[in-house]
Image (spheres, coloured by chain):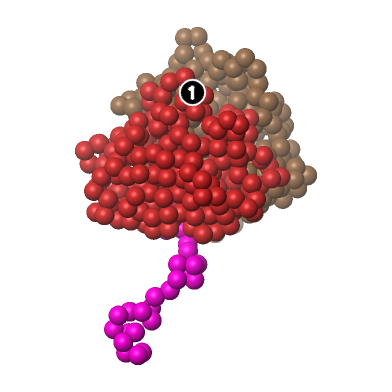
Chain colours: A red, B brown
Amino acid sequence: EAAQNHEDGAQFKLAYSDIEWLSPVPRTPKNILCVGKNYSDHAREMGAEKAPEHIVVFTKSPTAIAPDESTLPVHADVTDSLDYEGELAVVIGKRGKNVPKAMAFDYVFGYTIANDLTARDAQEKHKQFFLGKSLEGSCPMGPYLVTKDEIPDPHALSIVTKVNGEVRQNGSTKDMLFSVSEIIETVSKYVTLEPGDVILTGTPAGVGKGMNPSQFLKAGDEVKIAIEGIGTLANRFA
Amino acid sequence: EAAQNHEDGAQFKLAYSDIEWLSPVPRTPKNILCVGKNYSDHAREMGAEKAPEHIVVFTKSPTAIAPDESTLPVHADVTDSLDYEGELAVVIGKRGKNVPKAMAFDYVFGYTIANDLTARDAQEKHKQFFLGKSLEGSCPMGPYLVTKDEIPDPHALSIVTKVNGEVRQNGSTKDMLFSVSEIIETVSKYVTLEPGDVILTGTPAGVGKGMNPSQFLKAGDEVKIAIEGIGTLANRFA
């Protein structure tokens, strides 16, 4: 029976929950790069009168990175409005500057899922987004880093965010205003990209702040973000 | 004579210009943290109706760091409005989270000078400041990293920026709206500070954009920033 197990690999099978997952990129070489308002429905729910004409880029501290299946703090001492944002994350594989759109995918290593958690009060109060986006645990990523050859078109993926099982975001990466290759072209005009850099490509409509009334995360909540072809990123809050 | 030289150390004396200077912090563990509009005269010259009520924090890519005495690109292909900002830079020496104001200096390793070079057109166009602040060479720092014991009061230092010998900024760190200890307290509420992190504390009035008409940097210009007790950071542009 042991031989049989060995043959079909069963003895190596572990339940998903038996594994302690780490973020596929536990530490980025610079801050995580994030595109703001990259889906027009989300720009609208955040109160923007029109979608941005130019790419909006802000950053999150790499000390905010957390793994799949981890329990994350709601930071009730600092914010009363922690909000989720399910996003496709692009992982850079090659150093690049002034990368033309047509060459952009040469610089992509692969894709994962990120939750761009945001303290809405801090985001508003401090004007520039960095502080409200950088709380410890506010950038869970994972579970898998899928290499680019597995995702023939990163703009044909459904992206669904559930809070306690309820669907909150139900979008498609086809609705990005600026595509992955446009983002890489523009960002690399200003910033040297490095292997291990992560770019979050923006979130579709359906964040807690956009609800009426707004519904922010509280201790006990569970957020699951599923992106087609990549998997599901799940975190509980405490 | 050789013995004489040895005795007074003359044989070890090198001209400043014989030395290839490196930035005292060549690579920060996360993006450089920067406080925006931290001098009210500068906030006004940038068109703000009033000084910010809360600290504004944005970041610059660590790939932008450059040394004293280096020649920096004006990036004419990307911007027509590269501007200087002379700033006191605080270098963090100890990991910290939720650092109270009264303990802030325990987390400071020392001070240096930074030029927070900014592509004004990109800063405006892309809304969030990161892209316009992150061009290669846009964060020269140095020449010295002065330990904190040498600077009894970081809020009593003159800060003077000259372009081609002409005084453009002539301020004092006493005019900061948020002090070094307030900055450390607020930033560390949101972001875990790490040794080697650098915080730029904002620039006094007198940037090129604030002049009438605006005067931006061009090839051949030389910018020198002197801060009392630290030294002078000098860079040429090409």
**Residue farthest toward the left in the current orientation of the protein:** A102
Horizontal side, residue B14 vs residue A104: left or right: right
Residue pictured at 42% horizontal, 45% vertical: A160
Quadrant of the snapshot with the N terminus of chain A: bottom left
Percent position (x, y) of residue A195? 36, 52
Question: Taking B52 as reference, is A130 above or below it?
Answer: below
Provide the chain ID for the residue under circle 1: A
Does the segment drawn in magenta span residue A23?
A: yes
**Residue farthest toward the right in the current orientation of the protein:** B102
Percent position (x, y) of residue A89? 39, 47
Horizontal side, residue A6 vs residue A122: left or right: left
Q: Foreground residue, A28 or A191? A: A28
Residue pictured at 65% horizontal, 50% vertical: A219
The stretch of residues the image draws in magenta is A1-28
Does the segment drawn in magenta span residue B142?
A: no
Q: Is residue B235 visible?
A: no
* Location of residue B184 by image quarter: top right
Question: Taking B212 as reference, is A95 above or below it?
Answer: below
Percent position (x, y) of residue B229? 65, 37
Question: Taking B51 as reference, is A137 above or below it?
Answer: below
**Mark 1 nearby-residue class (10 Å; few <14, some 14–19, many ≥20):** few
Q: Foreground residue, A4 or A184? A: A4
Q: Foreground residue, A169 or A131? A: A169
Label 1 is placed on what type of residue? Ala
Residue on which the image places disc 1: A48
Percent position (x, y) of residue B31? 50, 43
